[in-house]
Image (cartoon, helix red, strand yellow):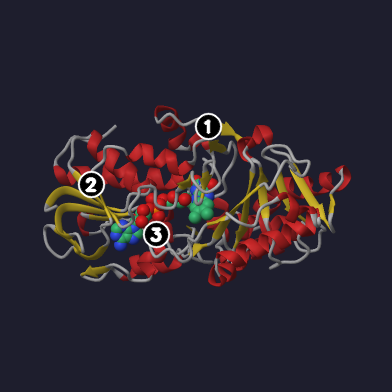
Amino acid sequence: MSGTDVLIIGAGAAGIAAARALRAAGVSCQVLEARHRPGGRAATDTATLGAPFDLGATWLHAANRNPLRALASGAGIELFDHGTARVSACFEDGRRVGPAAMAEYDATWEGLQSRLRGVELRPGDSAADLANRAGFGAGHWDATVLHWEGPVICGAPMAEMDARDYLDTQLEPPDLLPRQGAGTLLARLCEGLPVAYGAVLRHLDWSGPRIVAEGDFGRVEAAACIVTVPTAVLAAEHIRFTPALPADTLQAIHDLPLGLLTKVGLKAAGDDRLELPAFAGIERHVSREGEAALTAVAWPFGHDHLMGFVGGPAAWALAGAGAAATVDFAFAELSRSFGARAARALRRDGALVSDWAEDRFSLGAYSHARPGRAAARGILARPLAGGRLCFAGEACHPTLAATLGGAWESGAAAARQALPLLNKSSMA
Ligand SMILES: Cc1cc2nc3c(=O)[nH]c(=O)nc-3n(C[C@H](O)[C@H](O)[C@H](O)COP(=O)(O)OP(=O)(O)OC[C@H]3O[C@@H](n4cnc5c(N)ncnc54)[C@H](O)[C@@H]3O)c2cc1C
């Protein structure tokens, strides 16, 4: 490796999109990827459970505006609309919730967005402030819905997220599940791209007319550079910049921390499927804010495993305690709903637990804006050095933040803005 037109740091969704866009425009590029695989926060394990299991990104959300939807079929990936098979198995006090209570629960969900949008937004509001002013708190299902909205979906409590950013990044259905896995999809879209694996960037010098990247791989020069590493990795200063990044860029990085969602895969021990159809959502009533709870999808695609989720502060606490603690938590939670049957129906050994918190190339799951900092995504996406240095990735997208689709669009946009610097024709 010595020189290229554009250097791309990271072979996740944003980096792959940028490299494909540049290649399509006839521009040379080189991707430096720290891990020994592509996909970043999308990774499919096929070995442990005997079926594809996504440790990171799982669904193509907001599929009607998600650029990956159209790319999936070309990559030989089958997409399944989860909404067509969604059944909720919700439990309270060890019993499955009946139709009348479920109707109440559904109504709380359905009213959430319109109630939140009906409240006047004040500067510095957190999503929790908005929910409080909209009257959420005392209703029987309020804490359950807010648990979903904060820790499960956003990886962080509502109190830690900016209200404007929370509203702007809402994701509507359809939510499509790639049968072979979202990680497999990205790996296929990365095929044939110039990626150097195990190439950990340690220093980026953007002081001169050429950008210089340094690490164990040696030194690479380029006319422009697109950095797609997660904001938590940038905030931890694992990459040194010369000169230091401008104060507003640095502030934006710190204003877009990563929340945490941990996934756990549990295999069935025998034939007992807990009377749940494939794709059933397992959840339970949450009685107060801050209560840790597991949610799960049963038997995706008819496979013999459950896909469990724990998010927010509970996930951070479990990550510090190790994978076995997460498995114990999952069994304790499932026992609340299914009693002793859970331990008979599911195997403790061979469980799969994601470790995005400990992984030094992610240090969390996906970004949210701190209260009062909704502008941070736009600031981070602003090109530096006349466009020669650009940040991209999920954290930079104004509406599809925290998603594969957002990361993809952000990477493609960064590539487009680099083109004029290289005197190449602009891309479609
Ligand atoms: C548990 C979990 C569940 C999720 N569920 C969904 C979902 O259902 N749907 C959805 O759309 N999204 C989901 N997401 C979010 C989605 O995975 C991310 O938004 C998306 O993958 C981010 O892509 P990116 O390119 O911005 O960053 P990344 O994928 O993180 O790519 C950045 C790359 O930079 C590399 N890197 C880091 N440091 C260095 C360095 N120093 N030198 C070189 N390379 C480096 C990393 O290894 C990585 O490959 C989920 C994420 C997690 C963790």
Residue 300: percent from the left, percent from the top?
62, 40
x, y (%) of residue 21?
28, 38
Indicate which disc residue 230 carries. Answer: 3
Point out the image quarter for the C terminus: top left
Q: Residue at x 15, y 56 (%)?
A: 220
Pointer 3 or 2: first along the chain? 3
Callout 3: CB less than 8 Å from ligand 1: yes
Marks 2/1: CA distance?
32 Å
Q: Specify whether 147 is left or right of 94.
A: left
Q: Mark 2 vs mark 1: give the one in front.
A: 1
Q: Amino acid at mark 3?
A: Pro
- Marks 1 and 3, Cα distance to the nearest angstrom? 27 Å
Residue assigned mark 1:
79
Q: Which residue is mark 2?
A: 418
Q: From mark 3 to mark 2, how far is it between C-alphas?
A: 20 Å
Apparent side of residue 117 relative to residue 78 in the rendered image (left or right)? right
At x 48% / y 65%, what residue is drawn? 357
Q: Earlier in the sequence, mark 1 or mark 3?
A: 1
